[in-house]
Amino acid sequence: MYLVSACLVGVKCRYDGKNVSDTALEELFQSGQAIPVCPELLGGLSCPRECSEIIQTDKAAYKVASKTNKDVTAGFKLGAKKTLEICQSLDITTAILKSKSPSCGYGYIYDGTFSGNMIEGNGLTAELLSQNNIKVLNELNWNS
Ligand code: SF4
């Protein structure tokens, strides 16, 4: 069983109220092999919502802020924690998460300037799952 970002299997849970469906992942979900989860909704954020990015506030600290600088760090952290709890309660060891997202992105994310630039880094949920020995893949590499 996989955990999968809900927006990849048809759920309209992105910040803009849309999804980014991936046909192969939808098939995986339809076949009963994937549990869809949206960490940001689990963290209590609304849909639609302003887009947010992780902003490094100094060398060791960060916050997650919306485009109008509303601090949404607590919601992102709560969503990550709840997603980890779902994985642990269902013995899920692999998650397929949406690339680039400040929650789900793994390996590279937007740089916090809302300009489309990418930097190395992980979204909050991807990071927490990874720290807890859950393999994190994305929609581009999960079946390669
Ligand atoms: Fe998709 Fe993850 Fe963003 Fe939810 S938090 S919309 S699952 S990328």
Image (cartoon, rainbow, N blue to C red):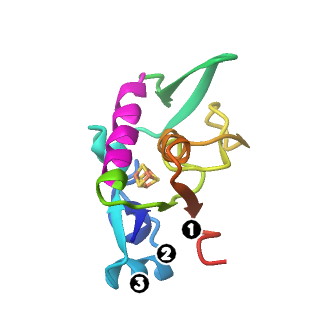
Q: CA distance from mark 1 to mark 3?
A: 13 Å
Q: Is residue 27 above or below residue 35?
A: below
Q: Position of residue 99 (x, y in %)?
A: 58, 56
**Disc 1 + disc 3, Cβ < 8 Å:** no
Q: Nearer the viewer, residue 10 or 50?
A: 10
| Mark 2 or mark 1, whichever is nearer to me | 1
Residue hosting label 3: 27
Point out the stretch of residues depicted in magenta.
71-86
Residue hosting label 2: 22
Tag 2: residue type?
Asp
Ligand 1 within 8 angstroms of badge 3 C-beta: no
The residue under the point 36% across, 38% down is 81
For marks 1 and 3 on the same chain, the one whose residue lies earlier in the sequence = 3
The residue under the point 33% across, 66% down is 35
Can residue 10 be seen in this snapshot?
A: no
Q: Nearer the viewer, residue 69 or 85?
A: 85
Residue 139's tag is 1
- Element class at badge 2: loop
| Mark 3 or mark 2, whichever is nearer to me | 3
Q: Quadrant of residue 111?
A: top right
- Element class at badge 1: loop
Q: Nearer the viewer, residue 127 or 73?
A: 127
Q: Is residue 9 above or below residue 66?
A: below
Q: Is residue 65 above or below residue 3?
A: above
Q: Quadrant of residue 120?
A: top right
